[in-house]
Amino acid sequence: MWWRRSAKCSRKLKPRRRSKSPLLRCVSLGRLMRIHGSSMLPLLRPGDLVLVKDWTPQDATPTRGEIVAARPMSFGGRAIVKRIAGLPHEHLNHQTQTWHLSSDQYLLLGDALDDSLDSRTLGPVTRAELIGRVWFRLWPPTML
């Protein structure tokens, strides 16, 4: 019967090997994330594709001014991309708000403060909620 013959033929066929492109090699170095909001304008625009390098124990601690990805529990565990504005053990004031950060808390703010859902609303994030450092923009291609 024709379906038996085609089954035998399909078993003999070997899957084609695909070579890894440089993009796929780059993706294995971190996580791909797409920017959805305009809170990081003018540096990151909606639709930009960024590469996030996961934190490892060997990495240095996050520093002020770095752009990071986080999954705050106060935001339902959804990912956000913001800039670190406050470090552990700091006391910060912004307009009418005051934060006293504990030993593992960070304050994250967007670059476009008028259009940003950040720590002013969500509260500080812990080190465990930080995903990693945004270190490369794949599209449009530029280093950060």
Image: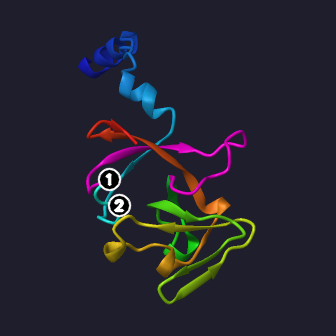
At 26% from the left edge and 18% from the top edge, which residue is drawn? 1
Q: Of helix, strand and loop, which one carries label 2?
A: loop
Decide: is 42 above or below 30: below
The x, y position of residue 110, in whole percent, is 41, 66
Judging by the rendered image, the residue that carries numbered circle 2 is 40
Give the amino acid at mark 1: Leu
Magenta span = 44-66
Tell me whether circle 1 and circle 2 mark residues in contact (CB < 8 Å): yes
Q: How does the figure colour the protein chain or chains?
A: rainbow
Q: Residue sitting at 40 percent across and 28 percent down?
A: 24
Where disc 1 sits, the SS reads: loop
* Position above or below: 99 against 30: below
Residue 43, numbered label: 1
On screen, residue 141 versus residue 109, left or right, reads left
Where is residue 141? Give x, y as percent. 29, 36
Identify the amino acid type marked 2.
Answer: Met
Q: Is residue 37 left or right of residue 25?
A: left
Residue pushed farthest right?
A: 103
Which residue is at 55% across, 76% downward?
74
Image coordinates of residue 29 in percent, x first then y, are 51, 33
Residue 30 percent location from the top left of the image: 50, 39
Q: Residue at x 69, y 66 (%)?
A: 88
Cα distance between the residues tagged 1 and 2: 6 Å
Of 32 and 113, nearer the camera is 113
As for residue 51 lying within the magenta part, the answer is yes
